[in-house]
Amino acid sequence: MIGPRLKSPPRRSPRPTGAFILAATGLLDGPRATTHWLAAPELSRRYPAIDVDPDVPYIDNGNLLTSAGAVAGIDLCLHMIRRDFGAAVALNAVGMAHWRCLQGPC
């Protein structure tokens, strides 16, 4: 199950203001992207070719994914797990993370 995923094209998914790094490379020109709402106006100003959407937690453009903040980055990671391995595995990951937080500092 994991083997085929290791052979797929690499994904780029910076969190959250890492969208500026992808923007500087030109990879975000054209597709929708998001970043933290405080940084979204600056991303739009610096890179007008990007369709910046500050009102969503994350955007999945295939192998190019962006998220809007720290918690949205966790949601994005769970989305990628669900996409790769299914909802049951993603729900298990949520349960493991929640259990860890109940045991002590997260």
Image (cartoon, rainbow, N blue to C red):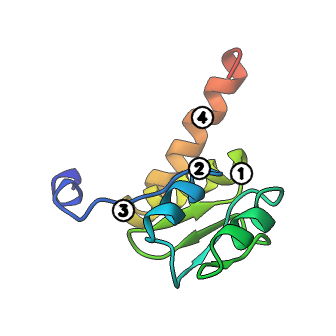
Q: Which residue type carries mark 1? A: Gly
Q: Earlier in the sequence, mark 4 or mark 3?
A: 3
**Residue at the image point whose x is 64% and y is 51% from the top:** 16
Quadrant position of residue 4: bottom left
Residue 84, numbered label: 3
CA gap between label 2 and label 3 equals 19 Å
> Tag 2's secondary structure?
loop
Give the residue at mark 1: 69
CB under 8 Å between discs 1 and 2: yes
Residue at 62% over, 72% down = 47
Q: Position of residue 3 (x, y in %)?
A: 16, 53
Read off the residue under disc 2.
15
Nearer to us in this view, 19 or 76: 19
Lower position in the chain sequence, tag 2 or tag 4: 2
The amino acid type, in three-letter code, at marker 2 is Arg
Please state which of residues 63 and 79 is positioned toward the viewer in this rendering.
63
Identify which amino acid the numbered label 3 is placed on. Answer: Asp
Mark 1 crowdedness (10 Å alpha carbons): few <14, some 14-19, many ≥20: many
The kind of residue on which mark 4 rests is Ala
Q: Earlier in the sequence, mark 2 or mark 3?
A: 2
Is residue 97 toward the left or the right of residue 72 in the image?
Answer: left
Residue 86 badge: none
Q: Could you say where residue 20 lies in the image, as x and y percent from the top left?
A: 59, 57
| Tag nearer the camera, 3 or 1 | 1
Where does the image place residue 5, in percent across and percent down from the top left? 24, 58
Question: Mark 3, residues whose alpha carbon is within 10 Å: few (<14), some, or many (≥20)?
Answer: some
Q: CA distance from mark 1 to mark 2?
A: 7 Å
